[in-house]
Image: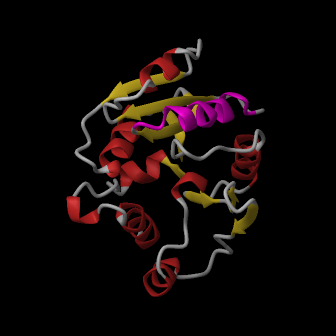
Amino acid sequence: YNFFFSVVIPTYNQSFFLKKAINSVLQQSFKDFEIIVIDNFSKDNTQKVVEGFSTEKIVYKKINNEGVIGKSRNEGIKKSNGKWIAFLDSDDYWYSNKLKTLHNFIKINNFYNVICSNELIVDNILNRNKTWKYGPYKKNFYNKLLIDGNCISTSASVVEKIFLEKNKIRFNERKDFITAEDYDFFLNLAFK
């Protein structure tokens, strides 16, 4: 592994948000990461936005994901050189201490394979915020996910790459899994 974190950002026609997402990663206090932007052939100025960052930290690839975001995330995983895969949707962004907090946590608790934080949901239209909490961990998390539905957010999660490889876990790329591919991914992780 060349990096501690690989940040996988799938995107499509969201150049305005993407710039903020990438900036939120580049401004991390913990610097041992790469950013992998997988662009579904955006028709806006996404490529220009990515090229506007003068850094070696960004890997940019265009693929035709046929509307299947799981395909973009899988491509990001495949291209990654990090010990941990951090997912970030292009319309989300992180606090500047996120990766440092995660790194410190992982160093002390090196027995986890998946970590998910809470999220602050910002509603600019109604001008109010709320926190979505994704914990705490329960024994038999697979059953909890089955019974309660998905309670893990992709943009708030990091997964150990070796765990994905060892268990051959990827996002499902079937069209009938669109919008549920993250739920399926976390069910598979919890099952293993």
Tell me the chief SS of the magenta region.
helix
Left of 155 or right of it: where is 182?
left
Q: Which residue is pictured at 48% across the width and 39% down the height?
A: 9
Quarter of the image where one finds residue 62: top left
Image vertical order of residue 58 relative to residue 114, above or below: above
Residue 43 percent coordinates (x, y) = 34, 29
Residue 23 counted in the magenta span: yes
**Is 123 contained in the magenta span?**
no
Q: In which quarter of the view is residue 118 placed?
A: bottom right
Residue 165 shown left or right of residue 25 in the figure = left
Magenta extent: 13-28
Q: Is residue 82 found left or right of 136 in the rendered image? A: left
Image-based side of 103 in relation to 155, left or right: right
Where does the image place residue 77, in percent across and percent down from the top left?
A: 40, 41
Residue at the front extreme, as displayed: 125
Quadrant the C terminus occupies: bottom left
Residue 36 position, x and y percent, is 47, 31
Residue plotted at (48% across, 79% down): 145
Vertical position of residue 133 compared to residue 113: above or below: below
